[in-house]
Amino acid sequence: MNNNKAEQVIKNHVIININETIEHALNENPELLLEANNYKKVKKELNADNIDCWEWDEPDIYEFLAVDEWLYNRLTEEGEITFEYLDFYVWGRQTTGQAIYMDEVIQKISACL
């Protein structure tokens, strides 16, 4: 685990937590996430063992973070839920309870630097 590189990725490429903005947008337009990059793929993987697609679980997103375009593209390539909203590149972070730099996807991205 290379925490120094991962911490730099977060410092340089995560702009701000925009939970309230996105949650407000989702209240007005609940289908906003349905068109997000990788949303359908993540949902399908989450429900791989559930043959009744009418009872599928939705992916849990714990935080919405505004990121720069570089990190947005890396996260999208890694299969993370991402989308553009207003002038923001948004990452739907699916982990919680730890520093962002410790997320597996951030560790993987930073390892390639």
Image (tube, rainbow, N blue to C red):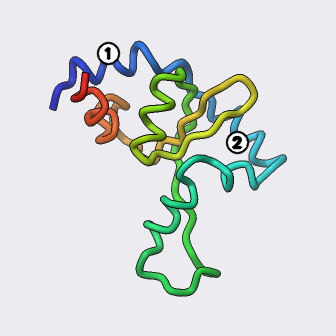
The correct choice, above or below, for 86 with respect to 8 in the image is: below
At x 69% / y 37%, what residue is drawn?
22
Q: Amino acid at mark 2?
A: Glu
Q: Which residue is mark 2?
A: 23
Whole-percent x and y of residue 57? 55, 70
The correct choice, above or below, for 35 with respect to 101 in the image is: below
Discs 1, 2 touching: Cβ within 8 Å: no
Numbered disc 1: secondary structure: helix
Q: Quadrant of the N terminus?
A: top left
Whole-percent x and y of residue 81? 53, 46
Looking at the image, tell me whether mark 1 or mark 2 is earlier in sequence order: 1
At x 28% / y 24%, what residue is drawn?
6
Q: Is residue 78 left or right of residue 64?
A: left
Q: Quadrant of the C terminus?
A: top left
Whole-percent x and y of residue 63? 53, 39
Q: Amino acid at mark 1?
A: Gln
Measured Cα–Cα span from mark 1 to mark 2: 28 Å
Q: Which residue is mark 1?
A: 8
Q: Nearer the viewer, mark 1 or mark 2?
A: 1
Whole-percent x and y of residue 2? 17, 26
The correct choice, above or below, for 53 with respect to 72 in the image is: below
Q: Residue furthest bottom?
A: 52
Q: Is residue 30 left or right of residue 107?
A: right
Numbered disc 2: secondary structure: helix
At x 48% / y 40%, what residue is drawn?
76
Q: Quadrant of residue 108?
A: top left
At x 53% / y 52%, what residue is drawn?
38
Q: Residue furthest right?
A: 28
